[in-house]
Image (cartoon, rainbow, N blue to C red):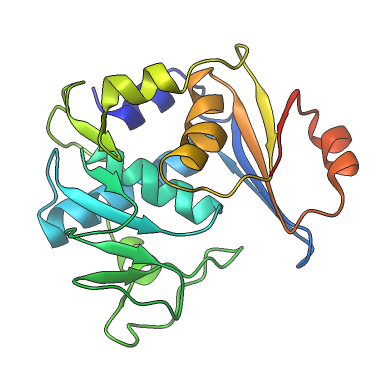
């Protein structure tokens, strides 16, 4: 079973899964399990159908902590991709205006999920393209021995990510570095059946703790 299926399958669809604040911009976006799953499915379908990604295929992710990044990571794992920070890859995901070698997909990082209005500078407009793909993914089986994150297999990622209490609602300001930040801030709370409140440009953490009823902090 893929890493994404292992993390999301046990969770009720309506459960709030990822809440993203940008305190500098004054934005808050909350995504349910169902919404995150849909974005992950669209990503997986796009990777498989457009870029022939299959279990073990390297996919590079060079993105900040953001709810769109969660969709990219979970979609890549659902397709069985090996997520890396850089190097030769079937696709490299970057922030708008950034560049990389090979096939590049720019992710808008817009809080409301708007796209970039089309490809630019040789990079595909990922959100604009991916939203055209299906909300369900029916890919091949992904064995636990498949590479999933920076040289770790699916099984190893799940083992390393353990440690938080069951049902943790995590407040995080960590950068989603690969692998450490992604493991600590994204995989770890989901592996407990919990949820994530990720804060960018933090300035109101006490307020977020109270409003979101978080139970554990992981702060930069």
Whether residue 9 can be seen here: no
Residue at the image position 67 percent from the left and 30 percent from the top: 170
Q: Position of residue 205 (x, y in %)?
A: 84, 44
Q: Is residue 131 above or below residue 137?
A: below
Left or right: 22 in relation to 103: right
Quick one: quadrant of the C terminus? top right
Q: Kindly tell me whether residue 39 is visible in this rendering.
A: yes
Residue 157 lies left or right of residue 163; in this view the side is left
Q: Quadrant of the N terminus?
A: top left
Residue 122: horizontal and vertical position, in percent? 26, 84
Count of numbered badges drawn on the protein = 0
Q: Nearer the viewer, residue 123 or 202?
A: 202
In which quadrant of the rendered view does residue 82 lie?
top left
- Residue in the image at 83% along x and 35% along y: 209
Residue visible at 12% across and 44% down? 54
Please determine whether, in this image, residue 154 is positioned above or below residue 116: above
Residue 129: percent from left, percent from top: 31, 68
The residue lying at 47 percent from left, 42 percent from top is 36
Q: Is residue 172 above or below residue 101?
A: above
Q: Nearer the viewer, residue 159 or 129?
A: 159
Instruction: Using the image, determine if residue 149 lies above or below residue 194.
Output: below
């Amino acid at each position: 079973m893929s890493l994404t299926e292992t993390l999301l399958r046990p969770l009720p669809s309506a459960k709030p899964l990822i809440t993203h604040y940008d305190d500098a911009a004054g934005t808050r976006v909350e995504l349910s399990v169902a919404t995150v799953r849909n974005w992950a499915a669209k990503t997986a379908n796009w990777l498989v159908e457009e870029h022939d990604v299959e279990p073990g295929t390297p996919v590079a992710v060079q993105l900040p902590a953001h709810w769109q990044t969660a969709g990219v990571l979970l979609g890549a794992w659902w397709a069985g991709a090996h997520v890396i920070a850089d190097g030769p890859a079937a696709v490299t995901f970057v922030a708008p205006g950034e560049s990389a070698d090979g096939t590049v997909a720019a992710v808008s990082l817009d809080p409301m999920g708007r796209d970039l209005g089309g490809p630019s500078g040789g990079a595909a407009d990922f959100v604009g393209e991916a939203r055209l793909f299906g909300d369900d993914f029916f890919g091949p089986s992904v064995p636990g021995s498949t590479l999933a994150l920076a040289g770790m297999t699916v099984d190893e990622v799940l083992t390393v990510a353990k440690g938080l209490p069951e049902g943790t609602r995590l407040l995080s300001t960590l950068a989603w570095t690969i692998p450490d930040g992604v493991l600590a801030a994204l995989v770890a709370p989901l592996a407990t059946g919990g949820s994530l409140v990720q804060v960018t440009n933090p300035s109101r953490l006490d307020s977020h703790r109270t409003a979101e009823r978080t139970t554990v902090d992981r702060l930069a």
